[in-house]
Amino acid sequence: MIEIKDLHKSYKMGSNVLHVLKGINFKVEEGELVAIMGSSGSGKSTLLNILGMLDGADSGEYTLDGVPIKNLSETKAAQYRNKFLGFIFQSFNLINYKSALENVALPLYYQKVPRKERQEKAMKYLERVGLKPWADHLPSELSGGQKQRVAIARAMAAEPKVLLADEPTGALDSTTSYEVMDLIQKINDDGNTILVVTHEEDIAHMCKRIVHLKDGVIVEDKKVEQVRAEQYV
Amino acid sequence: MFDRDVWQEIFNTLKTNKLRTFLTGFSVGWAIFILVMLLASVNGMENGFVGQFNDDATNSIFVRPGTTSKAYGGFEEGRRIQLKNDDVEYIKRSFPEDVEYISARYYTNTTARYKDETGSYSVQGTHPDHQAIEKTLVVAGRYINEADLINKAKVAVIGRKVAEDLFKDEDPLGKFVEFNGLPFRVIGIFTDDGDDNAERRIYAPISTYQRIYGNTNNINMIALTYNPSYDLSTSLEFSSRLEDLMKRRHKIDPEDQSGLYVFNYAEAFDNISSFTAVLKGIGIGVGFLILIAGIVGIGNIMVFTIKERTKEIGVRKALGARPSQIINLVLLESVFITSISGFIGLLFAWMILAAIGPTIETPAFSNPSVSLSVVVTATIVLIVAGVLAGLLPAMKAANVKPIVALSDK
């Protein structure tokens, strides 16, 4: 599903050049649930940004579902993001003046899905994350866990190939974190490929594979016994 | 463009920033208000000027005789030039393509009497064409016709004031009025837009008066209109040809300024229209400068809106919004504010003009108003202004890097 070969990325910080990713080789199969771990500055967010086409690599190859991702125009990148990827952010990033339903429907709007169909589909995904009764509520009327579940529904609404989650539990207390992880596990059980960036060990162990990043290289890549989050909920 | 989601977003941003939207909208509305008022004022001045000259056909030329100031062709200077009936025929024959209407004028004064009422009036002996040249409005009866001219009929077309003075409540048509003791039948009554004095005038067939006053062929002046399709330069060229020809005919030095006067109305009109054109230019210029201030205001609000919404735009881009869709959103919002506030300004200006415009009626300023073309132009200007105001902020928004916008750190 995802294939990365010898990926390099550096940032210019004034006169210094900060080499963030120093040759990453990495492969994700369909249906995997991968945790990307590392301390801050290890390059995990940069890797996720490149995977999410939010940032470009300096050198190396990146293939997503057989499509080479290289030298994309803004418009093309937008199309690919819309078609291939679903984002889940640490701070949810819901649009505050749109109801939960409209937030979920937004990626479908950019796919030019007709309004009625859009709403039906969005409602279906809201139901899946258990928030159907809150469809007409604004994000400000929802709890943190509920907001993240809306964001997950939104990421799934466009039926992307891969879900990218950047510290999805970073802003949540542990109980709510497990609820969210439970949801992510269930989505993965349905066959969706998911990448989770986290620095929390317990969250990482709820995935099926852990990739450790340190100073811009992968230091460890292991399959783990998945801890089901259900038992903590 | 007519997308519910786009409008929902626009209304939301406007709603959350009510005061800011109002203040910037006000600047554009005010600018349009001033622009329209300025243009209407220029229009009012133009109306005033044109009204003063509108008494006569605007394509008219008057030929008056004078006294020569130079010796020429064997004649001494100081010779009085006398125009005659032949001159009218001569001009008609010489310029069949150019002349539209032509009439001589023969001026006299008369003491008119009907029953017990008497009054002193000026009489103009004219040809039938004179009606069109002077734009005489016959409100009852008819004007002088060819038959009157040939028969040297004692008929008269009297001004409204004359009719009021002499006939009081009676209907003058068909009644006989005495001019210096000779009975003339009233065949028509006219009014004149120009002034009341023109309505104290009497028209009679020129042939009749020439016979009464000594069987003469003399005339006082010639009035004519030229082909109305002529533009200014053609008309000036025609009046100079006419002047040359008449001077040659009457043996006047071509350089002699006082032997013969040929006055072309177009010259006076040309001066007025260039004057009002300059005024209009100044009005538009000032209006646009004020409008620019408004546009900058709108641009300012859009820049702030986008700064506030950087994160949201980043999220949208991450969700697959194309740059063009972002630009579209910002431009539409800017065009929307500009258009709405501009229209309110336009509406206010229009209402004020409609309310007080028609009551303003002075010689130099009358009925200030805006034409449809001004409204259409203002609308186009507003939309263009909205696009201009939104363009930079929109590009800025489109260039928002989702990665920067989304960084939580």
Image: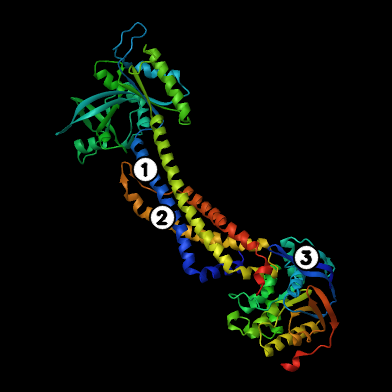
Q: CA distance from mark 3 to mark 2?
A: 58 Å
Residue in the picture at 47% in, 50% down: B289
Q: Is residue B376 visible in this depiction of the protein?
A: yes
Q: How many marks?
A: 3
Residue in the picture at 24% in, 18% down: B213
Q: Which mark is residue B45?
A: 1
Q: Position of residue B282 (x, y in %)?
A: 43, 44
Residue underneath mark 2: B349
Q: Is residue A157 visible in this depiction of the protein?
A: no
Q: CA distance from mark 1 to mark 3?
A: 68 Å
Please name whichever residue, B320 or B99, is drawn nearer the observer in this view of the structure.
Answer: B320
Q: Position of residue A185 (x, y in %)?
A: 77, 85
Please name whichever residue, B395 or B52, is drawn nearer the observer in this view of the structure.
Answer: B395
Residue underneath mark 3: A57
Please name whichever residue, A179 or B279, is drawn nearer the observer in this view of the structure.
Answer: A179
SS at mark 1? helix
Please name whichever residue, B165 or B320, is drawn nearer the observer in this view of the structure.
Answer: B320
Question: What amino acid is at disc 2?
Answer: Ala
Snapshot quadrant of residue B51? top left
| Pointer 2 chain | B
Q: Residue furthest top?
A: B74
Left or right position of B346 against B330: left
Q: Mark 1 and mark 2 in contact? Answer it, CB < 8 Å.
A: no
SS at mark 3? loop
Q: Mark 3 and mark 2 in contact? Answer it, CB < 8 Å.
A: no
Q: Position of residue A167 (x, y in %)?
A: 71, 80
Label 2 neighbour load within 10 Å: few <14, some 14-19, many 20+: many
Q: Residue furthest front?
A: A15
Residue B199 vertical position relative to residue B284 in the rendered view, above or below: above
| Pointer 3 chain | A
Snapshot quadrant of residue A222? bottom right
